[in-house]
Amino acid sequence: MSTNVIMPQLGESVVEGTVTRWLKRAGEAVTEFEALLEVNTDKVDTEIPAPASGTVLRVYVAEGQTVRAGTLLAVIGQPGEATPEAATEATGAHRAAPAAPAPPAEANPAEAGRRGELGFISPVVARLASERGVDLGQVRGTGQGGRITKKDVLAFVGGRDAAPAPWETPALGELFRPSEELRGAQPSVAAPSTAAAAAGSTVPLTAVRRSIAEHMVRSRHTSPHVSTIMEADLSRVLSHRLAHRESFGRDGVNLTLTAYFVSASVAALKAVPMANASWSEQGIVLHRGVNIGVAVSLGDEGLIVPVIQEADQLSLLALARMVNDLSGRARAHKLAPDEVQGGTFTITNHGVSGSLFATPIINQPQCAILGVGALQKRVVVIETPDPSGGVQDSVAIRPMVYLSLTFDHRILDGAMADAFLGTVVETLERWT
Amino acid sequence: MAEITLIEGLRQAMDEELGRDERVFIVGEDVGPRGGVFRATLGLFDKYGPQRVIDSPLAELSIVGVGIGAALYGLRPICEIQFADFIHPAFNQIVSEAAKMCYRSNGDWTVPLVIRAPYGGGIGGGLYHSQSLEAFFTHVPGLKVVIPSNPHDAKGLLKAAVRDPNPVIFLEPKKGYRLIRGEVPEGGDLLVPIGPARISRPGADLSVFAYGMMHHYVLQAAEIVAAEGIQAEVIDLRTLLPIDRAAILSSVRKTGKALIVHEDNRTGGYGAEIAAILSDDAFTDLDAPVRRLAGPDVPAVPFSHPMQDWFMPNTEKIAAAIRELAAF
């Protein structure tokens, strides 16, 4: 049996050595521990003893050659014995990593089934689910034992956000409050948050704030926003309201101006169905139902958009009742999930904080959003028929409001948007 | 750019600093005509003479004590501890004197001292030539602790350490002295700042933190698992004290998973500090437990080769730990 002669590691930090001289040649006999060759490293020069007695069958490394520790230098054995072919690195301390990759990790651990209902929820998964409003029960887990991983949540959110549900997209703007509050004391929303007032400090992002920011940016990137602005004379609406307030009150309903704006929007959405639509690459999706979201401010906590489902099927009384109910429960955090879903159009009343007109951001994937400005008594010029058949101008004081429509220019062009907004104005001004 | 060994990077750094600033000198066992047991100071005695490259007695307490005194007098000593294992007699000098001087004198006195010490196992050195002791020193405010993983950083960090006004414990992965080669720019004044860690391989699936010899193995392991579809981000910490918290946090905020590899034994090791930082400041970013792959809690690296292999983390063990964490 032959014995291999290996380049030893000559010192703790030494990884290679140079063969300076062979003391025995191939074919010569050698006894164990007899000096076989001389080796030089950058630390030492030394003789290497023969590891066994026998004949030097073959020498692999020539004098002057530098090789790594562990390299086969020579083979000692009995004449006629077979010798290895190549002077490759023998097995030793510096074994290379195995060439063949280890078998991949379990292909689909989810098939093993999740332990418990959801399995282990890691901190980052819990945070992402809360921030992005993810129902973890719907997420397929690919981690150990079917655990839901961070990647699983991100993949789920990625897929869902491709066609975001409307309730995840709070509208911009201020709350749509009953007009009593509008005319009452200064709204509290005008007071800046004390936390934000501290100079040079950072206010931590709440989940709602982060979500609003994300959706606003996404909406701006999704739709080309264009705004058009008109004004409406609310004289007839106000006199109608004055006349019916008491009878509505007897039914337990507080008749707010909001109900009129919802009703006027319904009329306009029916006149211009393209405004009750969503963009898709396959085509413009016209929605069958007219579901109108109304933005409700939750103060420092952000805002929420409850939806009046099938608003086109409701009378003014029913609309007013719905607005009362939804806005009240929104502030009390008592909305059911399906009450913030499925909106096809949104109204936001930024006028509450005194704003005359604004250009809100569209609540994706809707087509448009109506902004209602502050109600103001303004001097306007009124044209009345002249007995001689002409037109007579007169000056009057009228309750006026600016209305803005911000729309997705992929779906609507300016003329169609103006037709929509004109219908809202006309409905309000001709209220009977 | 020339490809050189890690130890040649160290030698060049000392040569250049000795040449640049006459306040710089080297003191240690056999560092003179012999050039050090690892030959890190080879040729420097002949070039700069016995006043600048000084053979010391076998007394580590005095090597460091002399260094501290000289530093207080305005010199820039580089103390060589032959093996990090032998540093313990100097512990009092390092911890009670060098580390505290600036604080104790309210900034009037500083100790611009570098202590070089080859550390680590896997070289068949047995109990007294294999120790890793970074954790003793990373516990001490007032010290800086640096461990390079490649010739470029070895050279640049050592030159920066010589110029640093504070005591720097410069631990050198001795197994990598001649094993790790790399390109280092020729000429110029190569400085690598003390402090910042470096992403040596970007990845999205998990973060692996290492330094010194283990960093070398981690890169190899990352290459192996990449073929299996696992993208490990590798961070070479380079400076252990002060710790680059921002680099650690930003990587884990991205990947959600962290593995720390060191050959020093696990309990009270440096990995525990990284795990604590992640728990403090990245808890809600974690998608898996923070894992440590470290030497076992036995008193020393065994001499027997099979036992040494059992002790030391290596490429295969690291790849296995990465796979396990990636699958979590």
Image (tube, grey):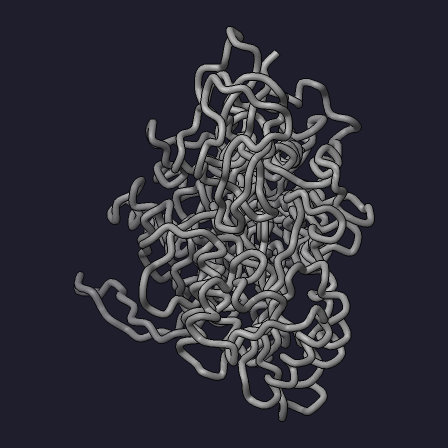
Image coordinates for residue A278, horizontal then vertical, percent: 40, 36
Nearer to us in this view, A212 or B307? B307
Instruction: Look at 43% across and 28% down and name the residue there.
Output: A61
Nearer to us in this view, B229 or A224? B229
* Residue A109, above or below A66: above
Instruction: Look at 43% across and 53% down and name the residue there.
Output: A217
Instruction: Look at 58% across and 15% down and name the residue there.
Output: A2
* Residue B148, above or below A105: below
Image coordinates for residue A221, horizontal then vertical, percent: 37, 49
* Residue B14, above or below B5: below
In the rendered structure, the answer to whether residue A221 lies left or right of residue A252 reads left
| Residue B3 in sight here | yes
Nearer to us in this view, A235 or A405? A405
Image coordinates for residue B138, horizontal then vertical, percent: 69, 65
In the rendered structure, the answer to whether residue B139 lies left or right of residue A91 reads right
Q: Residue furthest top?
A: A80
Screen quadrant of the N terminus of chain A? top right
In the rendered structure, the answer to whether residue A188 lies left or right of residue A271 reads right
Image coordinates for residue A353, horizontal then vertical, percent: 52, 70
* Residue A234, above or below A77: below
Instruction: Look at 63% across and 74% down and name the residue there.
Output: A195
Nearer to us in this view, B121 or A194? B121
Q: In the rendered picture of this protein, how many numbered marks are placed on residues?
A: 0
| Residue A188 in sight here | no
